[in-house]
Image (cartoon, coloured by chain):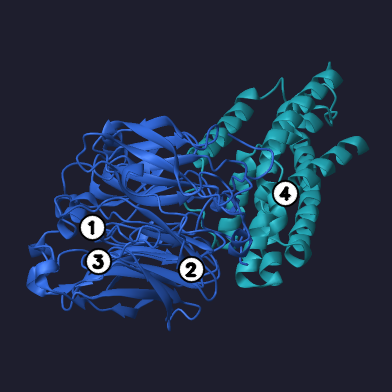
Amino acid sequence: MTRWTPDPTFYPSPSDAAGAPAEKLAYVAAFDRAAEKPDAIAVIDTDPASAEYGRVVGWTDLPHTGDELHHFGWNACSSALCPTAPHPHVERRYLIVPGLRSSRIYVLDTRDDPRSPQLVKEISAAELAAKADYSRPHTVHCGPDGIYVSALGAGRGDDGPGGIAILDHQTFDVRGAWEADRGDQYLAYDFWWHLTQDVLVTSEWGTPGMIEDGIVPELLLGRRYGHRIHFWDLAKRSLVQTVDLGDQYQMALELRPAHEPTASHGFLGVVISVVDLSASIWVWHRSGGGFEVRKIIDIPAEPADPALLPPALQPFGAVPPLVTDIDLSVDDKYLYVSCWGTGELRRYDVSDPFHPVLKDSVHLGGIVRRTPHPAFPDEPLAGGPQMIEVSRDGERVYVTNSLYGSWDDQFYPDGVGAWLAKADVTAGAFTLDQRFFPHGDEFRGRRVHQTRLQGGDASSDSYCFPS
Amino acid sequence: MTWGSYAALIALGAFHGLNPAMGWLFAVARGMQERSRAVLLRSLPPIAAGHLASVAIVAAVISATRSVLAADVTGIAGGVLLVGFGLWRLLSERHFRWAGMRLSPAQLAGWSFLMSSAHGAGLMLLPVLATTPVPVTHPGHALSGSPAGALTGLAAAGVHTVAMVTVMAGCALLVYEFLGVRILRRAWFNVDRLWAGVLVAAGALTIALTA
């Protein structure tokens, strides 16, 4: 899998990547909540000139059931151009697809037929546990020296510590746990890095036992879900600093560092405050020798008729926004924020990261609102904008609607459905694409989670050269 | 050493210098990150030193073993074994687990040493050194040829490295000042694959010349 010239989807700097051609295909993780049918990777046509635009044009079933596909990623990306361990002639070709519930990791080859990825390797839960002592693999990032996969749980049982496993980026063998010294870090979720500054950042959700059967009210009100973020020395693989947001802020999930290598700030989404059900966005930035974290956005809960709420929310008489995903455009200008509870996708101008400006938003679904897509105005939608993917040029934003099987059932007990929507972005407008709305039966009874764009997207690549 | 040998060593040095993976790209990245040409220039000597060390070890061993082939083979073989074992230990992870972007000059030299060794930079000198006549100080007494042989290897490594660092500095400055890193996307041909081809050709040439 070596080439004579660098993979054309690799870019040395964010500004170069922003000029990349538009994606022709999108890959979407689709899972069967009942674990009766196999989970799948659905392939969607994203070429507006195509007759099949906005349709599911490929489908790869996996060999087992009950994986619960969640997040996945590419084997290689622009970080292969980084000078510490350059591998510019590898190919962005394989999707590394973990099963969050089964702990299996699949490797799918997209090269020969991009519309029908082929399974070429399967890493068992036992192998992941034996070699790295982890389970419940979650986030995948292509690093310059290997494939990094975060995991929520320890190798055995339903507890922690979670952490990061390293896969060889040629053989895909599990090479071991990444951490040399984890200090008191125990909960894990997302991670990303400032590659040129040798800094890795990790966030916290909960152990498998805290999340797999749904959100546990006692744990939430007991403030036991994750509320810290950790800063690591990427070269020494050791924990350097931990910042506690305060235990009212439960579930510090998604991390989106600035793409620009000379910047040293990034954004963090927090799902819920147990004080007032609000969600929040935080920024981390360098201060003195370490990092500081500051809350920059509060999104309040919306009052609602308890009769319209699921049992878990009836005592509160309000819908929490539930910020479950955020995504930062490659030019670091716009931050997109999913409010999965209220059914809203917001766009903030974060050119000044400390003073974000809410530019605009669109509504879709929501626990109470059930806003339909403009192309199907008679179909109330369940779920809400959840996983966000932004194209490299920043002109298209894709959102899927499922959060996590058991949590979907709690917040949308009458069924979450399945849909993938796309918004078109210009400096002044943010509108849903009426031609692009694969949903319902097109996903063959599966729920849809994360989207990856062919050739890379705003949450897949990291760059070592400034713009 | 003949003029032809020196020309070959210089050409190989230039070839190493051209390869972005051998160090100049690292210097460019450090310079860009700090927005400082001085940082770029300060990165070059440690990278050159690491490359020199890697090449010199191999070159000295090749030259010395050729000059004392019939004599103290045990000592030389032991040395080769030690160097080989050390490199294997250092490289067995295939990626150097400590190699971040923010390296001290000593760490940068170490990185360069390992990168050069991993790419078999020293072995590239084999055809040149293997076809160079052995300096003989006392005809018929092979053992005394040993230090002189090693010195030939070190001189070869030095000439090679000067050529390498000259080209490396040129590439780094050209990209940093004028071309920009975007050129990598088109111009970074797969040197490793080319390398394999060159090695085969050089090996064949060596056999032809010595046979």
Chain letter for mark 2: A
**Mark 2 secondary-structure assignment:** loop
x 79%, y 32%: residue:
B129
What amino acid is at disc 1? Tyr
Residue A186 is labelled as 1
Residue at the far top in the pictured view: B211
Badge 2 or badge 3: first in the primary sequence: 2
What amino acid is at disc 2? Ala
> Which color is chain A depicted in?
blue
Q: Nearer the viewer, mark 4 or mark 3?
A: 3
Residue A165 position, x and y percent, is 35, 46
Q: Nearer the viewer, mark 2 or mark 3?
A: 3
Residue B61 position, x and y percent, is 68, 34
What amino acid is at disc 4? Arg
Which residue is under mark 4? B186
Which residue is under mark 3? A341
Nearer to me, B185 or A361: A361
Nearer to me, A356 or A399: A399
Nearer to me, A323 or B196: A323
x 77%, y 40%: residue:
B151
Residue B163 position, x and y percent, is 81, 50
Can residue A291 be seen by looking at this rendering?
Answer: no
Which residue is under mark 2? A258
In the rendered structure, are the residues bearing label 2 and label 3 in contact, judged by CB atoms less than 8 Å apart?
no
Q: Nearer the viewer, mark 1 or mark 2?
A: 2
Query: Looking at the rendering, which quadrant does residue A318 occupy?
Result: bottom left
Q: What crowding class fits label 2: few (fewer than 14 Cα within 10 Å), some (14-19), or many (20 or more)? A: many
Specify whether B84 is left or right of A177. right
